[in-house]
Image (cartoon, rainbow, N blue to C red):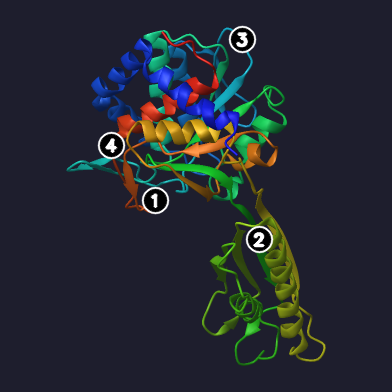
Amino acid sequence: MTSAVTIAAPKIIEELLASFSVQVAFGFFDSHAEEITEEQIRICSIPAPPFDEQRRADYLCERFGEIGLQDARIDEEGNCLALRRGRSLSPLLVVSAHLDTVFPAGTDFTVRRMANKLLAPGISDDGCGLVALIAIARVLAVVRIVTEGSILFVGTVGEEGAGNLRGVRYLFGKGDWAKRIDAFISFDGGGIDRITNGALGSRRYRVRLRGTGGHSWADFGVSNPIHALGRAISRLASYPAPRQPRTTFNVGRIEGGSSVNAIPGEAVMEVDLRSASEHELVRLDAFFRRAVREAADDENATRRKDDLPLELNLQLIGERPSGETRPDDQLVELAQEATRALGFRPRLDQASTDSNVPISLGLPAITLGGGGMSGSSHTLDEWYDPSEREAGLKRALLVILGMVKVKPG
């Protein structure tokens, strides 16, 4: 049965498209395309390695202040926040992008142009999302669009990797606005068709094994931490991961030892477990933890008499909740209708983004691309093509205004 929300979304988008102020805003995106690209280059050129996003947060707060947003500040976790107050604080919509990159300190973030492409680490993920925040905040101010509800613009820390969504967790946990947020939109990377309404759950582990070490010949028989990790990896590789619901595992990093002829005293690996199903993730997680313990036990069982056993430390270093914003939720319906209205075919998908946290709390949340095209994310060869970026910004504006109940005019 078609819901009232499904019927309402096309009408909301139709009325917004007929609004003179919205058309003026669309014209702003078109006429300021190169200026928006230059802003993206400036953002990307500011290093933001994991757990060191301060400089980029400072820049974003400065820009929010220049635009005229209220109370632009950095919270205790490092997020940059600024409010655009409507006629009421309710509904309160968070519009966000993440400040951090996956790249370590010392990475060269210089942006290079090659034909229509911009090349630099993090240029799309999430330079594209951050510049979308600024462009949308600017157009709302320039066109003086009045909304019923309010918009909280947020640049979050810790979205990537070991950051474990720490910025958005703080926003919804201990942040000043935690209990007042009604809906959430995140901009992450490029694209115009993608609407991420599914939160992909994951668990990440660091496995550390310590032993006495020794000489490869003279001390042969001493429990070998790397051999134990090998046993664990072999067990994990044998796991019958289902294709549906999609379930994956990955040993992403392994280290240990000092020489080819020395038994290592310590070895470490980091492992990523994911599934589209919380039930399957729990099963995989239990299998992995058991595999690690059994691998250590098997290696210890082969050690020489009177030698000390390996010491196992299994640490959960990341856990991202799963869930879904239903396809018939008004936020998802607005995003789909806005995508169609601009001539593109919407595609619902599932991924691990800042939206995982609000989705897990039962709040409407989606992640959108900021327009344009991109590739080679999380590599030094990352690129972004701003062609048709304007369509992504227009879609974003329509969804935002549909949620905060702008009066067409």
Residue assigned mark 2:
205
Q: Are marks 1 and 2 in contact (CB under 8 Å)?
A: no
**Label 2 neighbour load within 10 Å: few <14, some 14-19, many 20+:** many
Quarter of the C terminus within the rendering: top left
**Label 1 neighbour load within 10 Å: few <14, some 14-19, many 20+:** some
User: Mark 3: which amino acid?
Assistant: Ser
Residue assigned mark 1:
377
- Disc 4 vs disc 2: which is toward the camera? 4
Residue at the outermost left position: 115
Q: What element carries label 3?
A: loop
Disc sitting over residue 386 in the figure: 4
Does any portion of residue 97 appear in the rendered image? no
Q: Earlier in the sequence, mark 2 or mark 3?
A: 3
**Label 3 neighbour load within 10 Å: few <14, some 14-19, many 20+:** few
User: Mark 1: which amino acid?
Assistant: Ser
Residue at the outermost right position: 306
User: Mark 4: which amino acid?
Assistant: Pro
Q: Earlier in the sequence, mark 1 or mark 3?
A: 3
Q: Is mark 2 on a helix, strand or loop?
A: strand
Q: Are marks 1 and 3 in contact (CB under 8 Å)?
A: no
Disc sitting over residue 88 in the figure: 3
How far apart are labels 4 and 2 at the CA level? 37 Å
Position above or below: 310 against 367 = below
- Disc 1 vs disc 2: which is toward the camera? 1
Q: Earlier in the sequence, mark 1 or mark 2?
A: 2
Q: What element carries label 4?
A: loop
How far apart are labels 1 and 2 at the CA level? 23 Å
User: Mark 2: which amino acid?
Assistant: Tyr
